[in-house]
Image (spheres, helix red, strand yellow):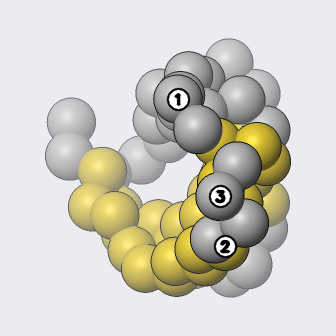
């Protein structure tokens, strides 16, 4: 991703178990855990990025996985 100096995406289940981690802005979560599809549910994400301009962004929210 252009202008991104650092990137971290974390996906957790409702019990706080870390299911996915990426430090590559071009590589996102595909809805699986350990190679198996996750159940249709609500998952929590945390996105932290810093840009070449020095700006830092942290976002936390939820995503609905629908199969």
| Residue at (76% x, 43% y) in the render | 5
Side (left or right) of 34 relative to 61: right
Point out residue 31 in the picture as x, y percentages from the top left corner: 46, 35
**Is residue 12 among what the camera can see?**
no
Q: Secondary structure at mark 2?
A: strand
Q: How many marks?
A: 3
Label 1: which secondary element: loop
Front-lying residue, 58 or 41? 58
Give the answer, above or below, for where 19 lies relative to 18. Answer: above
Residue 41 in which image quadrant: bottom left
Q: Which numbered circle lies on residue 56?
A: 2
Q: Residues within 10 Å of mark 3 (few under 14, many from 20)?
A: few
Q: CA distance from mark 1 to mark 3?
A: 11 Å
Say which quarter of the image contains residue 15. bottom right
Expressed as whole percent of the image width and height from the top left, the position of residue 18 reads 78, 60
The residue lying at 43 percent from left, 79 percent from top is 61
Q: CA distance from mark 1 to mark 2?
A: 15 Å
Which circle marks residue 35 in the picture?
none
Residue at image point 66% right, 73% down: 56
Say whether marks 1 and 2 touch (CB < 8 Å): no
The reply to whether discs 3 and 2 touch (Cβ–Cβ < 8 Å) is no
Image spot of residue 43 (x, y percent): 47, 66
Q: Residue 4: where, in percent of width, then height?
A: 64, 42
The quarter of the image holding the C terminus is: top left
Apparent side of residue 63 relative to residue 67 in the rendered image (left or right): right
The residue carrying mark 3 is: 53
> In the figure, 39 relative to 28: above or below?
below
SS under mark 3: loop
Answer left or right for 20 relative to 45: right
Front position among marks 3 and 2? 3
Q: CA distance from mark 3 to mark 2?
A: 9 Å
Residue identified by numbered label 1: 2
């Amino acid at each position: 991703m252009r202008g991104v100096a650092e990137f971290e995406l974390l996906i957790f289940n409702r019990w706080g178990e870390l299911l996915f981690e990426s430090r590559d802005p071009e590589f996102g979560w595909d809805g699986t855990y350990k190679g198996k599809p996750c159940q249709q549910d609500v998952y929590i994400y945390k996105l932290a990025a810093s840009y070449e301009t020095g700006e830092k962004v942290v976002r936390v929210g939820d995503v609905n996985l629908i199969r």
